[in-house]
Every structure is written in C-alpha cells, then in structure tokens.
Amino acid sequence: MGESHPERSTEAFFGRRRGKRLRPLQHDALNSVLPQLKIDLESSPPANLAELFSQPVKETWLEIGFGGGEHLVSHLERKPETGFIGVEPFVNGMAKLTSALEDRVPANLRLHDDDATQLLDWLPEASLDGIDLFYPDPWTKKRHWKRRFVNETNLDRFARVLKPGGTFRFASDIDTYVNWTLLHCRNHDAFDWKAESVESWRRPYEYWPGTRYEAKALREGRTPAYLTFIRR
C-alpha cells in the first residue's frame, strides 16, 4: 500500500509516526490531498503568509498536533477568510484529516507532516495571528518533562512568529501540564495570560467542536483547561 515512511530525526517530536495500517480510502486521501497542501520548507517563506493560500485571507493561524483534525476541519468553512496551517507528524492523524476533507482541497489550508519546530523556524517573524496547541502529549513521567512541547525554547519560537497582540491557546486535561504551561508562560516576558475568572479557563473556546482526546478525558473524569495567552 506504499505506507513505508523512513523515521526522521526531529527536535520536538518523540511519539510514534504511525499506528494501525491505513484503510484503502484513508491511504488514497492521504496520497491525493497532502501533496497538494504540503508546505515546501526547502523554498523561501513568503514575506506575507497570505501568499501561501489560493484564496485571499485576512489572518493566519497555526494548529500544532491537530490529531484527527476535528477542530481544524470545523473551522475551515466557518472562517473562510482565515488561513489555517495544520501540523501533524502522526501519519494516521494526517490520514484522518485528509479523509474528512472528502476529496476537497480547501483554499485556506496548508499542511506540514513533520516536527512543528521545523515549520516555526521557517516562518517569517511576526507572521501569525494565532497558535493553537490542543491536548499535546503530556509526557506525565517527570523524567520525560523535557519532551513537553511547551518549553522556553519553543515559547521563544512562538514569540518570534506571533504578531504583537497575537494569541497562543493551550488546552489540556492534565493538571501538571496545565500548571507547567502557566508557569512557563508567566516566566516568559512575551506572554500575558488572559483569564477573567476560573470559569473563563474552564469554558471551551468559541465554536469548540470537541475532540476525541477531550471526550476520553471527560469519560475518565478529568476536567480540561482552556488557556489563552496574548503576545505582548
């Protein structure tokens, strides 16, 4: 089925690259849609990210680790004037997204199927309006905390590519990772936490479609947190 992919050495992706063997329709969708939307990091980035998209967009958002693509797909048609860049190194996740598009190639979507740090380093300075990081791998064991995507180096990357006033949103059901993210963003001079009350960070974001990770957390009795940080 042509699903053999060489393992790649990356800075910030430590999980599996693939899971169960793809079904034929998933395989076909992946091979049909991804090549049309994949960003070529060998080329020079455009001065204006709007040039990445085949229709006019007024803003650009990046979603890192989109999983099955539930959030990303739900917003493509809801926000046609927003350009979305989705990152997912896990082959099965990328296959689920491309299958959900049902052979459509959205004009306001681009994709990257490798380590998000590669894309972040390629993007121009102050080029993004928002970054979403929803339910990232929490690496719950203390010896693995250094693998968490939220760290000083990646917050520096976020600060470089976000426009002043841009938004970084983080959702997780793991208390230690929520506290970890609050602490790291508080200690970083580029970010302010936007929270008016406890309810404001327990309440899902506007037009939140839910995800399979969130559904699992709720079934198992964990309460998600939805944090929002503003780039100074």
Image (cartoon, rainbow, N blue to C red):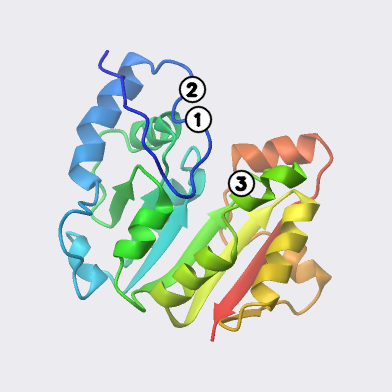
Image quadrant for the C terminus? bottom right
Which of the pair 62/149 is nearer the observer? 149
Q: Secondary structure at mark 3?
A: loop
Residue 6 x/y as whole percent? 32, 27
Q: CA distance from mark 1 to mark 3?
A: 23 Å
Q: Position of residue 126 (x, y in %)?
A: 36, 79
Q: Is residue 150 left or right of 222 when viewed as pictured? A: left
Q: Give coordinates of residue 161: x percent, y percent.
A: 39, 73
Density class for disc 3 (Cα within 10 Å; few <14, some 14-19, many ≥20) is few
Say the numbered circle drawn on residue 19.
2
Q: Residue at x 31, y 25 (%)?
A: 5
Residue 119 falls in which quadrant of the image?
bottom left
CB atoms of marks 2 and 3 within 8 Å: no
Which mark is on residue 229?
A: none
Label 2 CA crowd tier, 10 Å (few <14, some 14–19, many 20+): few
For label 1, the SS is loop
Image quadrant holding the N terminus, namely top left
Q: CA distance from mark 2 to mark 1?
A: 7 Å
Check disc 1 and report the residue beneath it: 16
Q: Is residue 85 visible?
A: no
Residue 167 location, x and y as percent? 52, 73
Above or below for 190 versus 176: below
Q: Which amino acid lies under the numbered mark 3 shown in the image of this protein?
A: Gly
138 left or right of 58? right
Residue type at mark 1: give it: Arg
Q: Residue at x 68, y 63 (%)?
A: 181
Q: Are marks 2 and 1 in contact (CB under 8 Å)?
A: yes
| Any part of residue 204 in sight | yes
Question: Which residue was labeled with disc 3?
Answer: 210
- The amino acid pointed to by label 2 is Gly
Task: Please give the name of the residue rendered at 23% of the width and 69% of the height, measured from the top-left corner.
Answer: 50
Foreground pick, 158 / 104: 158
